Image (spheres, grey):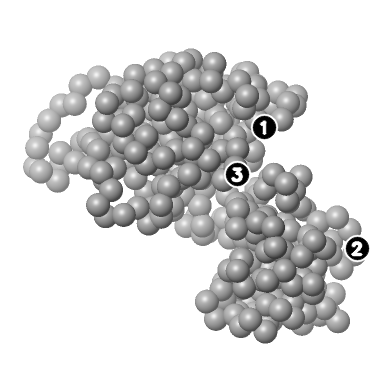
Amino acid sequence: MKNILCVLPVEQRHKDKLEKAAAGCPIIYSSPDKVTDEQIAAANVILGCVDAKRVKASENLELFQLNTAGTDPYIVPGVLHENTVLCNATGAYSKAVAEHALASLLMLQKKLHRYRDAQRENNWTDFGTVSSITDFTVLVVGLGDIGCHFARLVKALGAYVIGVKRRPSAKPDCVDELYTQEELEKLLPRADVVFNILPGTGGTHHLYTEEYFRLMKDSAIFINCGRGGAVASEVLYKAISEKMIASAAIDVTEVEPLPADSPLWQLDDLVITPHVSGYYHLPHTFECIVEIAAENLAHYFAGEEPRNVVDFTTGYKK
C-alpha cells in the first residue's frame, strides 16, 4: 500500500475522482497549514503544494504533484530526493492568466484606469487619445500554455503576434513570428506590448533591465504575469516615471506583498493586482488541477510516465 497525501481543498466529487485513480489506496486529506511533518515524511505521493522546507528530501516521496505551474522552491538542490518525480500544473492556468492579461491590456489601451481614478475624485475629465489592439504588435515572452493562450486571444482581435521561446521549435499557429530568448533585445523596439510570462529561474531574474526598457517604444505597454523577479522594482518605477514606456500592468512584484511604502503604488500609469490572475480565482482552474492530479495518480499506479514532469535543471516542464 502506498501513502497518498492530498492538501488540495477538494470537495467530495473531487475525492471520488482521486480515489478512483488511487488503486484502492487510502488518501489522507489535509491542508498546507494543517498537515503534519509526520504525514509529509510518510507520503509516497503528495498532491498539492506543501512548504518546500518541510519536505526535507524525503526518500519515501516518489511522486509530488504541485498545484502550481511555477516550481521555483522545489527545484532547489536538497529540497527533493533525487528519486522524486516532480510534476507541475502546467495547462491549468492558461485561461485564467491569459484573460487577466488581456483585460489589463485593454484597460490600459482605453485608459480605463485613469477614468476610474477620476471617478473617485468626482472628476469629469477627458484623457485624450486611445489605441486599438488591431494596430498593435504584441511580443509574448514565454510561449508556454499561458503565452500561447494569450497569443491566440490577441491575434483573434487583430494583433500581430511575435512569440519568444527558450528553445527553437516549429512556429505555432498562434504567432506570426517565433524567436528564441537570445533574440529578445532586437525584438523589443518592434513591440507595442511586451507580455512577460516567463517562470522564475536564474536566467530570467532581472531580465528586464533599464537598457531593455529604453529599447522599447515610449508608447509601449508592459504586462507581467510571470514572476516579479523578472524586473527590479526600482527599474520598473524609473521606466514608467521617466516615460520610457507608456504604462504597465503587473500581477507579480519583486517582493510580495508589495510593501506599502513602495513608490510603485503612486504611479498613475501602473496597474497593480496582488498575484490574483491565477490561483483558484477562476473555478475552472481548480477543476483542471484535480484532473491533472487524478490522471497522474493513475499513471503512477500503472507504472507509466506522468504528465507535466519537471526538469530540475530548468524548472520547466520537460
| Disc number lying in front (1 or 3) | 3
Q: Residue at x 59, y 34 (%)?
A: 142
For the image, the number of numbered tags is 3
Q: Which residue is mark 3?
A: 201
Q: Identify the residue position indicated by label 2 in the image.
A: 303
Gap in angstroms between the C-alphas marked 1 and 2? 30 Å
Front tag of 1 and 2: 1
Residue 132, image x and y in percent?
A: 38, 21
Q: Is residue 114 left or right of residue 147?
A: left
Chain-order first, disc 2 or disc 3: 3
Q: Residues within 10 Å of mark 1 (few under 14, many from 20)?
A: some
Q: Amino acid at mark 1?
A: Arg
Q: Dot 1 corresponds to which residue?
A: 166
Using the numbered discs, state the Cα–Cα distance from disc 1 to disc 3 in whole angstroms. 12 Å
Mark 2 to mark 3 CA distance (whole Å): 31 Å
The residue depicted at 41 percent of the width and 55 percent of the height is 256
Mark 2 vs 3: CB contact within 8 A: no
Coordinates of residue 212 in the picture (x, y in percent): 45, 24
What secondary structure is found at the residue carrying circle 1? loop
Q: Quadrant of the N terminus?
A: bottom right
In the image, residue 266 sits, relative to residue 132, either above or below, namely: below
